[in-house]
Image: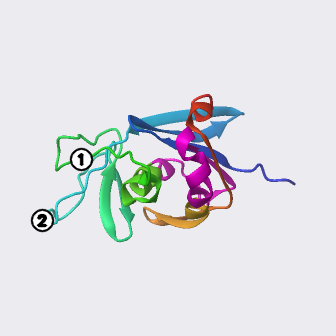
Amino acid sequence: MNKTPVIRAVDVGYGNTKYIRNVIDGIAVADHFPSIVNRPSVNKNSFQESEDIYQVVVNGNNYEVGPGVDAALEGGVRIMHDNYIETEDYMALLYGAISQMNVDVIDLLVVGLPVDLMGSKRAILEKILTGTHRVGNRDVQVRKVNAISQPLGGFL
């Protein structure tokens, strides 16, 4: 019996991070949260407790993302510059989206990339995202990544 491939999409945009959470009977279940990254202070003993705050770790650093993160709390920031796909903030937003997908293997991850970065950053982004990522308490394997222009990503 052939297993249906797991295909998911994430678009880390300036305003929101949009993603496909699941596919049920061929229908994509989409969700989003503000593209705001909160770095808890070093004096804080734990992450905020909330269903709407996704707690992720990137390179050993704690981050909070999700619909419950308030930009005014502890210096939450929005990111967007030519190298943002190579930042921990970008990965925190991406991991926040992946944490809500509840899968351990993604056969194809489609990600959005600004049109002006397609030539210079597409291969870099696809390489960074292909492989195994520690997301929460589990490892998520991303087998293949396809970066597409963000205007196209909006139609997914």
Q: Is residue 8 above or below residue 132?
A: above
The residue depicted at 49 percent of the width and 35 percent of the height is: 31
The residue depicted at 59 percent of the width and 43 percent of the height is: 9
Q: Gap between marks 1 and 2, in whole Å? A: 16 Å
Q: Secondary structure at mark 1?
A: loop
Instruction: Looking at this view, name the residue that lies furthest to the right.
Output: 1
Q: How crowded is the residue under tag 1: few (<14 C-alpha within 10 Å), some, or many (20+)?
A: some
Q: Give the number of the disc on residue 11.
A: none
- Residue 137 horizontal side relative to residue 68, left or right: right
Range covered by the magenta-colored residues: 97-126
Instruction: Looking at this view, name the residue that lies furthest to the bottom.
Output: 60
Point out residue 149 in the picture as x, y percentages from the top left corner.
60, 39
Q: How crowded is the residue under tag 2: few (<14 C-alpha within 10 Å), some, or many (20+)?
A: few
Point out residue 17 in the picture as x, y percentages from the top left corner.
44, 40
What residue does disc 2 label?
Answer: 43
Q: Amino acid at mark 1?
A: Gly
Q: Give the number of the disc on residue 76.
A: 1
* Front disc: 1 or 2: 1
